[in-house]
Structure formats: C-alpha cells, structure tokens
Image (cartoon, grey):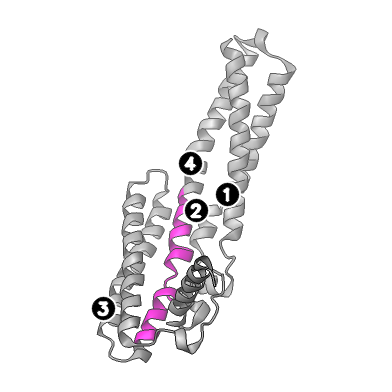
Amino acid sequence: MSRRSIGIFTAATAGMACAALIGGPAFADTATPTPTPTASHAPKTLAQLQAAGAKATSDRETKLTAAITKVNADTSLTSSDKSTILATLNTDLAGMKSSASAIAADTTTTQAAADLKKVFTSYRVDAVALPQARLASDADRLTGTTLPKLTKEQSTLATLLSGKDKAKSTSALQSDLSDMSAQLSTASHDASGVAAAALAVTPTSYDANHSALSSAKSSLASARAAVKKAQADAKAVREAVKK
C-alpha cells in the first residue's frame, strides 16, 4: 500500500471512529450519514468519550459566542428577529456549557455516550442555529436596506429621464428601468418571509427533514440574483445620465 493510500485510510478510519462515539449518523450536524466503523476501531473508553465531548462543546461555544457578538452588532436585523436569534444562540450556548460539565462528570461510558449524543441532536448548532441566523440576517438586510435603496434609486432615475435628462432617454434605458422594476419586484417577493421561515426551523424539525432550511436558502439565492440584475440595470442608466 502506498504512503498516500495509508494516509487516506488512516484519516477515514479516524473520522468513522469519532462518529461511533454516539451512534453513527446522529453525531453529525449535517444530513450526510456517517459510516459505522468496525468495533475494533471505535473509541469506547470513558476518557475518549469525555475528550470528544470537551472538543465538541468547546468548538460550539466558540462559534456561538462569535455569532452572538455579530448578531448584537447587526443593525440590519429587525428587533423581533434579533430577539429570536439571540434567544436560540444563548440557549444553545448554555446547553453547551451544561453538556460539557455533564460529560466531564459522567462516570460510565453509557452515560457519557448519551450526553455526547445530545450535544448534536438536542441543539444542532452547526446545522440549524448558526445557518438560520445567517439566513435571517441576510434576508432582513435585503428587505430592510438593499431593496429600499434600489427602489429609491429606480424612482430617482425614472424622474431624471422623464424630466431634466429627458433628452438622454432611449428605448434601451427605458427597458433597463422596466427590468430594474421587475427585478426588484422579484427580489422582494422571494426575500419576503425568508427570515421567518428560517427561524421557524428547530432541531426537531431538522431531524424530521434535513432539507428544512433548503427552501429559505433557495428563495434568498433567487432574491440575491434579482438584486444583482437590478443593480446592473441601475448602473447602466446612471452612467448614461451622467454623460
């Protein structure tokens, strides 16, 4: 076996062994199933379980703390969405701290494995809490800041081309303005309700459907695409007016 093959085999074995600590797929924060390792490769000692628990909770505490700081500073979030997000993040942070203490105090492998599993299945920090916060923030930024600014610019440009810059108006520029209006309408429609839909997802609903956030992600992506087109339309008209 080549050195490269040995390295790949070793890395794969280590990953599968870690997953076995809490029973396979339930360990992961994503929908990708984790292969079950052979008994000879699965770490089973109390010390190994506690080490895995300390790392899992510590990693999530770091991510949650950073996210909480970012959300508190985010001026684009509505007060309601910010409150909902912070409630989830702070609850999960408290959960990670209590789980870390519980796992460290466990005296049997059975209890340690059960407590470690809860770190992933009861909170879903990476699969739900963090991505739904990002989706809500991005959606609120679009609906509360980006779209209003572009709508105002579309109105300003339309006024210029029908007023003092009427001589610069062409069928192409009028087409750009019409398309800009259509794209803004599409973006507004697609972004509407994204934040609420994303924040409605819970670990339980995610466990029942690992695609629970897919619709919100898809709608937001569509809204962003429409915004880019509207921005391109605005640029074309703006540059023509400046000439």
Query: Which residue shows up at 53% across the image and 69% down it?
Result: 2
Residue at disc 4, secondary structure: helix
The first of marks 2 and 3 along the sequence is 3
Q: Which residues are magenta?
A: 112-137
- Which mark is on residue 101? 3
Residue at disc 2, secondary structure: helix
Distance Cα–Cα, label 1 vs label 3: 38 Å
| Amino acid at pointer 2 | Leu
Residue that badge 1 annotates: 220
Quadrant assignment for the C terminus? top right
| Image location (x, y in percent) of residue 85 | 40, 58
Which residue lies most toward the right here?
Answer: 171
* Eye-nearest disc, 2 or 4: 2
The first of marks 4 and 3 along the sequence is 3
* Eye-nearest disc, 4 or 3: 3
Query: Which residue shows up at 61% across the image and 10% down it?
Result: 165
Label 2 Cα neighbours within 10 Å, binned few <14 / some 14-19 / many ≥20? many
Residue at disc 3, secondary structure: helix
Residues at marks 2 and 1 touching, judged by CB atoms closer than 8 Å: yes
Q: Is residue 79 above or below residue 106?
A: above
Residue at disc 1, secondary structure: helix
| Amino acid at pointer 3 | Ser
Label 4 Cα neighbours within 10 Å, binned few <14 / some 14-19 / many ≥20? some
Does the magenta portion include 18? no
